Structures are given as structure tokens and as C-alpha cells.
């Protein structure tokens, strides 16, 4: 190879290695920040989250949360998995401990991006103590989740004057949720300027021939109509002929 060609080839190789290093930082890179969260579960187990942020540049980076788990009090913690999130100007990259179903067994919730309103995209992760791993339980896209009569309830802001509630049926043993909502609830004002008018509340579900209004599965679900207060009008399904 001629000297000039050899120099050009080496220069191209150096540029390529620089770009790869910029996009995929080596594991030996020191984190720009580190945070730790710890919690104990109702059964005596515990876990710790160690979250580290690695910046690539001013607007790009990644956040890695290592999950350390102990099956019982007094036993040492061991790393059982990682949660990797994009981090930067367009990403919230938040991670925190939650107990969304109030059963005393905590989960891990992440937030990746948020819109103009309260809705945020992220996920809920559960710790599988038997398998010793962290697994994704549910992808979130709303503002709040809770448990009600065997359904995961996700509330999302639908517009300036409406909320949408999706109810996902939990699978047996609570190992996951069904892929689509079993039913939804639309709670809305006619406009945001007429807040004294009654709020309308509509329960509906998908059917083979289209979306149909339904009655609440149980009286307790009527509390979902009270997102704007206790004054609302419930739309009832048409009687079957």
C-alpha cells in the first residue's frame, strides 16, 4: 500500500472508532451521576435500585438502573437485572419504587417521555423472586394506574375537557395483563368553559360489530365517573330488543 493510501485508511479507521465510542460508550466509562433507592416488601424480601446516568453529549445519553434483590431479611443482595432508558433533553428518564396495587410487594416504575399534559410513557417492572429476574409487567402511557376488582385501571388525559380510563383484566396469578382493555370509560365536559354543566360518563367496550355502550361491571366502578366531581350523567346502554 502506498504511504498516502495507508494514511487515509488509518485516518478513516480512527474516525470510525471515534464514532463508535461516542454512540456506544465503553462499560468502563464513569457515570455522570448515581442515585440509590431501597425498599422492603411485605414478605421480608427487599431490593435496591442503583441508577447511573452516562452522558454521550449535551442532548444524548442513557440511564442504567441495576436491580439488586434479597429474598429475605439478613441475606445479601445480588444483582438480578438492568433497566436501560434513553436520557437527554427529550427524555425524562425517571425510575422509582411503586406499589400501584397496594399489596405490599413493590414494583419498579419508569418514565421515558411525557406530553404537554399529565400523560407519560414508561413501564412497570416486577421482580420474579423464583426466577431471580426483573420482567416488564405493563407499558404505561397515561397519568395514573391503580387496581380495582381485578382490573388494572389506567387514567389518561384525553383532551382539554376529557379523561379516558382503560380497564385491563389481570391474568391469573397477577403475572400480567390482557393485551387490550376489557372496557373503557370516557368522562368529559362539553367544553372547558362550561364546567357547571353536568359531566357525561360513558362505559363502553369493543364488540365484533363496533364499540358499544355498556353498564358498569360493578357499582364500585362508578367512582371512575367522578374525575371532575360527584355531579355527572351516566350514559346507559340501549335496551336489547
Image: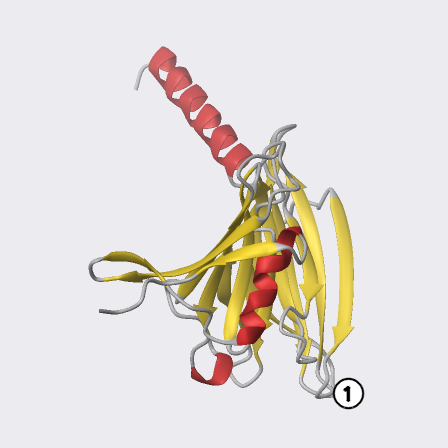
Assess disc 1: are there few (<14), some (14-19) or many (≥20) residues with their C-alpha within 10 Å of its C-alpha: few
Count of labels in the image? 1
Q: Along the line of sight, which residue is nearer the eye, 15 or 118?
A: 118
SS assignment at label 1: loop
Q: Is residue 26 visible?
A: no
Determine the image quadrant of residue 50: bottom right
The quadrant the C terminus occupies is: bottom left
Q: Is residue 196 visible?
A: yes
For image coordinates 69% across by 55% down, the residue present is 51
Q: Residue furthest top?
A: 4
Question: On the rendered structure, is 188 left or right of 239?
Answer: right
Determine the image quadrant of residue 8: top left
Q: Along the line of sight, which residue is nearer the eye, 161 or 28?
A: 161
Q: Which residue is mark 1?
A: 73
Q: Position of residue 158 (x, y in %)?
A: 51, 43
Q: Position of residue 133 (x, y in %)?
A: 54, 74
Q: Position of residue 206 (x, y in %)?
A: 31, 60
Vertical arrangement, residue 235 with respect to residue 45, above or below: above
For image coordinates 76% across by 51% down, the residue present is 34
The quadrant the N terminus occupies is: top left
What is the basis of the colouring in this image? secondary structure
Q: Position of residue 130 (x, y in %)?
A: 54, 86
For image coordinates 77% across by 87% down, the residue present is 73
Amino acid at each position: 500500500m502506498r504511504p498516502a493510501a495507508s494514511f487515509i485508511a488509518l485516518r478513516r479507521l480512527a474516525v470510525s472508532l471515534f464514532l463508535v465510542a461516542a454512540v456506544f460508550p465503553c462499560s468502563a466509562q464513569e457515570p455522570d451521576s448515581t442515585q440509590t433507592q431501597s425498599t422492603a416488601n411485605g414478605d421480608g424480601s427487599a431490593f435496591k435500585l442503583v441508577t447511573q446516568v452516562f452522558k454521550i453529549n449535551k442532548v444524548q445519553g442513557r440511564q442504567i438502573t441495576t436491580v439488586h434483590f434479597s429474598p429475605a431479611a439478613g441475606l445479601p443482595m445480588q444483582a438480578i437485572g438492568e433497566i436501560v432508558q434513553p436520557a437527554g433533553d427529550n427524555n425524562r428518564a425517571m425510575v422509582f419504587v411503586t406499589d400501584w396495587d397496594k399489596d405490599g410487594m413493590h414494583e419498579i416504575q419508569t418514565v421515558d417521555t411525557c406530553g404537554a399534559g399529565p400523560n407519560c410513557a414508561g413501564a412497570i417492572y416486577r421482580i420474579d423472586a423464583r426466577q431471580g429476574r426483573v420482567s416488564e409487567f405493563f407499558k404505561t402511557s397515561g397519568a395514573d394506574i391503580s387496581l380495582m376488582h381485578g382490573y388494572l385501571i389506567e387514567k389518561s388525559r384525553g383532551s382539554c375537557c376529557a379523561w379516558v380510563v382503560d380497564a385491563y383484566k389481570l391474568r391469573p396469578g397477577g403475572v400480567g395483563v390482557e393485551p387490550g382493555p376489557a372496557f373503557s370509560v370516557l368522562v368529559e365536559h362539553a367544553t372547558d368553559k362550561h364546567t357547571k354543566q353536568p359531566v357525561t360518563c360513558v362505559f363502553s367496550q369493543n364488540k365484533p360489530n363496533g364499540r358499544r355502550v355498556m353498564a358498569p361491571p360493578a357499582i364500585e366502578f362508578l367512582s371512575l365517573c367522578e374525575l371532575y366531581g360527584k355531579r355527572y350523567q351516566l350514559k346507559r346502554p340501549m335496551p336489547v330488543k
